[in-house]
Image (cartoon, rainbow, N blue to C red):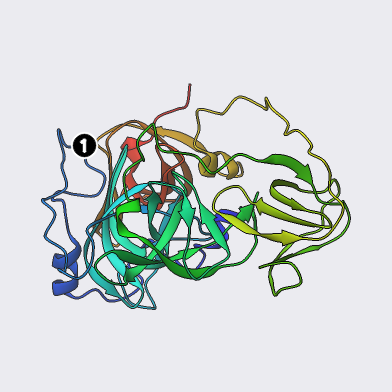
Amino acid sequence: MAILLYLANMTIRLAFAITLSSLLAFAFACGGGGEYVENAPLENVTAPAASWPENFVTGPGNGPALYLDASAASPALGYVSEGVAVRVEGAPENGRVLARIMGPMKVKAYIDASRLGYRVQRRGKVRGTPTYVGPNDIVRYLGAEDGTRTRVEVTPMIGDVPLGTFQGSFPTVGLSPDAPSADAEAPRAGETRRVPAGQSVPVYDRPDGQIVATIPSTENGTNVTVLRDQNPWFGIRVGDGPYIVGFVNVPLGNGIGTAGGGTAPSAVPARIEAESAHPLWRVPARTRVKFNDRTVGILAEDGYAREMNRYADSDEVDVFIAVDDDVALRGMVPTAALQPVE
């Protein structure tokens, strides 16, 4: 239920006035709510502003990321996971930009610009920060610094715990929305060691220097990669990628292995699976998802939906819907689109 609490301000029925011009600006598919349309494409993408890139990949973030429009009062439409390809139209307005997601569920909505980033193509330090990145790490895009470097924001993580957020620059040729080449060099190898359990450990920019980050206290300690041994100081790299690089001056134990295995993934997308209090349905491909009479998504493949409300007068159902774990939307589909889950 926690996922839908973020969308509590959202009313699928017409809850605020929509001007004809805004409706036409957003509409990207014809036809009624949720109708089945053979080969239902979104219309051609218009060229973005010259100063703003066109293609991105989504970075990490919490809460809704997709909205009906760029206004601060816009209702939230849904969620997008990290690593999803996004194509934008124009530059951000009020921190949001009109975007398309061309995956198993085609989406056109405004996305939070803070979620737009690039995949790192080669290893290296982010200038002006204590962070290091390797191939396929994702950094947030902030803008061009000059002809050869791009401003980025980096948030190293240990699991779901951030180690801080830093802004710096990275070579533009080392950033792309695409996956890096298979032969891209990984970060330099080192010895896996472990900081002590039950205590926070500061990371310094140099021995006896300034603290740049803090490794949080954990029950079993945290693995770090030792790159330099200057006992009692150790040059380390820590994080899941991106990383913090610096020095610690605590005794280091042996590294601990990570648990493998786990349960097999469910066929039902995780966000849909989590809303178990609501009826679960299958929804066929080519179904349109509408929000305030705007088509905001088209299923390119069969998906799953949780029924939130049903409206007999319009023969529509308010659903939380997804095809995979990349994107989940809240919107209306026709009652006839809901099929039993076998």
Left or right: where 197 falls relative to 310:
right
Dot 1 crowding, Cα within 10 Å, few <14, some 14–19, many 20+: some
Q: Amino acid at mark 1?
A: Tyr
Q: Which residue is mark 1?
A: 36
Disc 1 is placed on an element classified as loop
Quadrant of residue 76 within the rendered picture: bottom left
15 shown above or below 31:
below
Left or right: where 186 falls relative to 291:
right
Residue beneath the point at 29% across and 67% down: 97
Where does residue 178 sit, x and y in percent of width and height? 31, 44
Q: Nearer the viewer, residue 223 or 87?
A: 223
Q: Is residue 311 visible?
A: no
Left or right: where 14 falls relative to 259:
left
Q: Nearer the viewer, residue 339 or 226?
A: 226
Where does residue 85 sit, x and y in percent of width and height? 32, 47
> How many marks on residues?
1
Where does residue 60 sit, x and y in percent of width and height? 50, 55
Q: Is residue 248 visible?
A: yes
Quadrant of residue 172 within the rendered picture: bottom left
29 shown above or below 216:
above
Where does residue 195 sit, x and y in percent of width and height? 81, 51
The residue furthest top is 342
Residue beneath the point at 65% across and 62% down: 163
